[in-house]
Image (tube, rainbow, N blue to C red):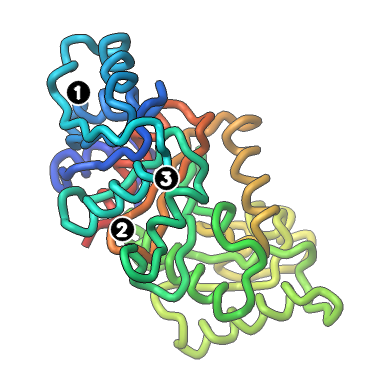
Amino acid sequence: MFKNFAELLSYVKQNRKGTAIIAGAQIESAIEAGVMAKKEGLCESILVGDKPEIIRLIQQKAPDLVNAFEIIDTGSDLRKAAETAVALAKEEKGDLILKGKMESSVILKAALDKEKGLKVSEVISDVFVYEHPEGLKIQTDGGINILPELNEKIAIVKNAVQVAHALGNPKPKVAMVCAIETVNPKMPATIDAALIAKMNERGQIPGCIIEGPLAFDNAVDKEAARIKGLTSEVAGAADILVFPNIETGNVHGKMLTYYCHYKIAHVTIGTKVPILIPSRADSGETKMLCMALALATMS
C-alpha cells in the first residue's frame, strides 16, 4: 500500500493520466487544483461555469496558463454547471468530476439522475483517505449515506475495499466502528457490525478481513485492544474504519483535517466516473489529491 500521497501522485502521473471536469469552477480552490494538476503533469481539466470569473481567477493564479484550459460557459447557474459536467462525463469527455462552487447535493443530484446520470451501483459512498504516520488509511462514509441499513453498509464496505485494493493493499483490515466492542440489542449498529463480520468470515465479503463491533480505540490502538482483551488481526491495526452513520464519519473526517492537519482526499464510488465532493473550504492541494485518488481507482 502507498505510504503517502507523494507515492500515490508519482504512481498516477506515470500510469493513470486523464481529464478532470470541474463543475462550477469559479472558485479559487478549484482553479488552484486544476492549475496544480496541470503543472504536476497529473491531468488536464475542463472548466465548467462562469467563464469571465474563471478566466479572472486563472489570470490571478497562473497567468501563463490562461489559454491552457477548455472552458465551457454555463454562467452563474450552478445547477446547469453540474448537469453539463455530468453530460460531458457521460459522453466520455472526462475521467472524473470535481465539484467546485456548489454544495455536494447539487452535483450528486445531477450525477444520480435516473435518465441522465452516472449511477452504476445501487449504493454509492464517499471513501475518505488520510495520510496517517503509519501510511494511507481509509474511513467511510461521512459524505453521502445518512443512516445506512445493513445492505447499504455492506456496499459501503465493498466500495472502501475497492479503493484499498487500488492503493496497493490486497487484503485490508476493516473495523466496523461502534460506541462499544460488544453486541448490544439496544444498539443496532453493533448487530449490523457483527453480521457483516460473520459474512466476511464465511466468504460473502471477500478481499478483506472484517471485525466488529469495535470501539474506535480498539480499532486503532493495539494497547487499548490488549487491555480490553481483544486479540485479532484487525484490533489495533485497522486500515479501514467504517462508521455507523454520516455524523460520526463526517466529524471524524473533519477532525483529521482541522485538528490533526493530515493530508486528505476522498472519492465517491458507485458512479460511471468518480465524483469528487471535497468541502468548498478544502484547499486546492486537497482537491488536487482528490483528483489523483480518483485516477488511481480507475480500472
Q: Estimate the spatial distance between the alpha carbons at disc 1 and disc 2, rounded to whole Å.
A: 24 Å
**Residue 195: % across, % down:** 63, 84
User: Is residue 188 shown above or below 228?
Assistant: below
Mark closest to the chain's N terminus, 3 or 1? 1
**Residue 103: % across, % down:** 52, 42
Tag 1 residue? 39
Q: Nearer the viewer, mark 3 or mark 1?
A: 3
Q: Residue at x 63, y 63 (%)?
A: 235
Q: Estimate the spatial distance between the alpha carbons at disc 3 and disc 1, rounded to whole Å.
A: 29 Å
Tag 3 residue? 79
Q: Residue at x 42, y 45 (%)?
A: 79
- Disc 1 secondary structure class: helix
Q: Nearer the viewer, mark 2 or mark 3?
A: 3
Kind of residue indicated by mark 3: Arg
Of residues 197 and 227, which is closer to you in this image? 197
Q: Which mark is residue 166?
A: 2
Kind of residue indicated by mark 1: Lys
13 left or right, relative to 155: left
**Residue 163: % across, % down:** 38, 59
